[in-house]
Amino acid sequence: MRNERNGNSRDILRRWCSGQSNALAIPERRKFRRVHGLQLPLHPQQVTGWIVILIIVVNTFAILTPLLEPNLRPVFSIVIAAIFLTHICSHLTVLLLDPADPRVRSQPTNKVLPEFDRQKHSHVIENGRCHLCNITTESKRTKHCSICNKCIVRFDHHCKWLNNCIGARNYRAFLVCLISAILASLFVAGLSVTELSFSLFTDRFASPSMENNTTDPVIPFIAPASDTTLIIAISAIGILSAIVAILLLHLCFFHGYIACLGLTTYEYVRNKREKNSVAAAVAIAAAATAAAAAAAAAASTAASTASGTATSAVTTTAATAPTSVATTTVTTVAENASTITIQR
C-alpha cells in the first residue's frame, strides 16, 4: 500500500515537474512538440526561479520599502514596482511566445511526430530538410530542439529557467527579461546595503512604527520585530539579490559578447567544441608522434648495442684463433718427437 502511494506521488510529480533526465530526452522519445513554457511538465529550475522572484518581491515591499524615509518611500516604491512589472511582463512573454518556425506553428499541436531513425539519417536536419517536423528550413540557423521537439528559427538556446526555447521570435523579450531582472536585483541589493548602513551607524530604522512613537519596528503584514530580526532579514534579502545580480550580469555580458561576434549561443558552443576537438586531436597526434619517435630511438639504440656485441665477439674469435692453432701445433710436434725417441 505504501509502495503504491509512493508510486502515485512520483507519477504526479513527474507530470507537473520534470527532472533533467526527462527534459533532455532525445527527439524520438517525444511524440508531441511543446508549445510554450507553461506547458506541463515544468522544469525544477523554472519553479526555483519563480520562488526566488516571489521571495525578493514580497520582502522588498514588506520589509525594505516601509523602512525608507516617508518622503523617499513613494518614489522608490514606484520605481521598483515598475521594474518588477516590466520583468514579470517580459518573463510571461518569453514563456508564452512560441519561437517555432511559422510552418511548425501552423500544424496542430496534437500532431504526433514520427520517430527519428538514426540508421537512415545521421542528423535531424539534413540538406535543409527536417525529418521530424517535415518542413524545409529557410536558414542554416534553424535548429531542431530536442527538448521542445520543434524547429526554432535562429535557435539560440533552450532556457531551463524559462522552460522554453529562445529564438528569433522571443529573443528581444528574453533580453528585456534579463536586463529588468538585473536592474531589480541591483536595486534591491543596493537598498538592502543602505538600510543596513543606517541601522548599524544610526541605530534606528525609518519605519512606520517610529512615526507612531512605538518602541519596536514592525514588519508590515507580518508581525512586530526587533532590530536584530530586521538586520537578519535585510541581510538575507541583500545577499540573495546580490547573488542573482552577479549570475545575471555574467549571462548579460556573455550575450553582449556573442552579439559582437555575430553568433548565437548554440553557434558559440558548437565552435568551441569543435576547437576543443581539434586541439585534442592535435594533442593526441603529437603524443603519438612523440611515442613513435621514442620507440624508433629505442630500436636504434638496441640495434647499435646488438651490432657492437656482434663485432666484439668476432674480434675476440679472430684474435684467439691463431693462438689456439699455434698451441695445437706445438703440442702435436712435441708428441711426435716423444714418439720418435721412444721408438729409437
Image (tube, grey):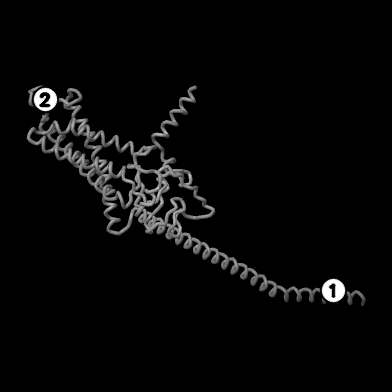
Residue 181 image offset from top left, x and y in percent? 24, 43
Relative depth, front residue between 13 and 330: 13
The residue type indicated by label 2 comes to Ser
Instruction: Tell me the residue at 31%/51% (across/down).
Output: 169
Q: Nearer the viewer, residue 117 or 303?
A: 117
Q: Amino acid at mark 1?
A: Glu
Q: Quadrant of residue 280?
A: bottom left
Image quarter hosting the C terminus: bottom right
Q: Residues within 10 Å of mark 2 (few under 14, many from 20)?
A: some
Residue placed under numbered mark 2 in the picture: 209
| Location of residue 163 in the rendering, given as x and y in whole percent from the top left corner | 35, 42
Residue pictured at 76% horizontal, 74% vertical = 327
Does residue 239 show up?
A: yes
Element marked by disc 2: helix
SS at badge 1? helix
Q: Is residue 169 left or right of residue 68?
A: right
Q: Which picture quadrant has residue 36?
A: top left
Q: Which residue is mark 1?
A: 335
Residue 187 spot, x, y in % from top left: 18, 41
